[in-house]
Amino acid sequence: MRNQTTPEENLAPGIVPKAPWRVARVQALSDFRLAVQFVDGTAGEVDLSRLVTSEQAGVFSTLRDPTLFAQVFLDYGAVAWPGEIDLAPDAMYDAIRAQGRWVLE
């Protein structure tokens, strides 16, 4: 199970490694939640439980499989899963800075 990635493993030419919204660490938690930490040290929780279980989940419905959800990884500073599923790191950062968590519906 790959659920943590270090920022050093995730550098790419042309990508600003110190942009504050770049995710530095991600860990899958129970109940379709994630613990994230950004390169500037900001940390919080992402709750995907409502989105993943929603009838309008779209591509995120595949994450209902706990085994797939646990395969979360970093793709150049963005949270991602196999199958080209990812989350917008800038929106995540803004919500976590403001409220300590990001709840997707």
Image: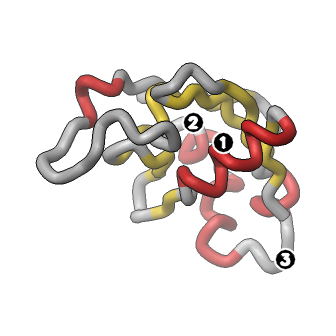
Location of residue 24 with respect to 15 vertically, above or below: above
Location of residue 5 with respect to 72 vertically, above or below: above
Q: Position of residue 89 (x, y in %)?
A: 54, 51
* Element marked by disc 1: helix
Residue at horizontal 51 percent and vertical 43 percent from the top = 21
58 vs 22, left or right, is right
Give the amino acid at mark 3: Glu
Residue at horizontal 63 percent and vertical 26 percent from the top = 42
Give the amino acid at mark 2: Ala
- Frontmost of labels 1 and 3 is 3
Other residues around mark 3 within 10 Å, as few (<14) / some (14–19) / many (≥20): few
Tell me the quarter of the picture where residue 97 sits. Answer: top right
Q: Position of residue 74 (x, y in %)?
A: 40, 40
Q: Which residue is mark 2?
A: 70
Other residues around mark 1 within 10 Å, as few (<14) / some (14–19) / many (≥20): some
Q: Relative to the observer, which residue lies in front, 50 or 10?
A: 10
Q: Which residue is mark 3?
A: 55
Q: Which residue is mark 1?
A: 66
Q: Position of residue 60 (x, y in %)?
A: 64, 65
Q: Along the polypeptide, which appears first: circle 3 or circle 2?
A: 3
Q: Is residue 103 visible?
A: yes
Marks 1/2 in contact by CB < 8 Å: the verdict is yes
